[in-house]
Amino acid sequence: MKVWTISFLDKDGVQQTLDLESEQRPSEEEAAQRLRPHLFPVTTDLDLNDLDGRTDEPTVKTLKDQNAVQIVSIVEAS
């Protein structure tokens, strides 16, 4: 299994990273879905994707619009 480093800007605009294991490079939406419980554990049980099916990448949009979190890059860890 490969390790992927997700670089993102947190709610304070500070760049941070999170390593995820996956066979293939995760899309931004997949990375956002795995990032959200790490940053906001309470939201794990909530259905926050009211945009699901109505917009592309609903988790990416929710993280950016409601939590000011933006994914900067997804690269394979060295």
Image (cartoon, rainbow, N blue to C red):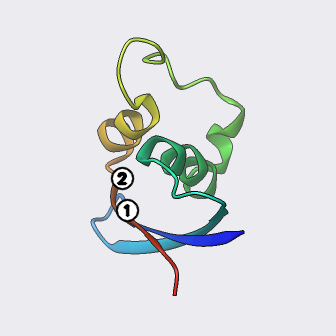
How far across and down, in percent of the image, does residue 57 sit? 40, 32
Are discs 1 and 2 less than 8 Å apart at CB? yes
The vertical placement of 50 against 33, above or below, is above
Of helix, strand and loop, which one carries label 1? loop
Q: Which residue is drawn at 66% across and 60% down?
A: 23
> Percent from the top left, x then y, of residue 61?
35, 35
| Quadrant in which the N terminus is drawn | bottom right
Q: Please, what is the three-letter code of the amino acid marked with disc 2?
A: Val
**Residue at the image point whose x is 68% and y is 39% from the top:** 44
**Label 2 packing within 10 angstroms: few (<14), some (14-19), many (20+):** many
Residue type highlighted by circle 1? Asp
Question: Where residue 26 appears, x then y in whole percent?
Answer: 52, 53
Which is more N-terminal, label 2 or label 1?
1
Residue denoted by label 1: 10
Q: How far apart are marks 1 and 2 (CA)?
A: 5 Å
Q: Residue 22 carries which label?
A: none
| Rendered residue at 42%/47% (across/down) | 28
Residue 60 lies, with reference to residue 16, above or below; the image says above
Q: Nearer the viewer, residue 77 or 62?
A: 77
| Residue assigned mark 2 | 69
Q: Residue at x 65, y 28 (%)?
A: 46
**Residue 77 point in image, percent of width and height:** 52, 80
Furthest residue toward bottom: 78
Foreground: 12 or 3?
3
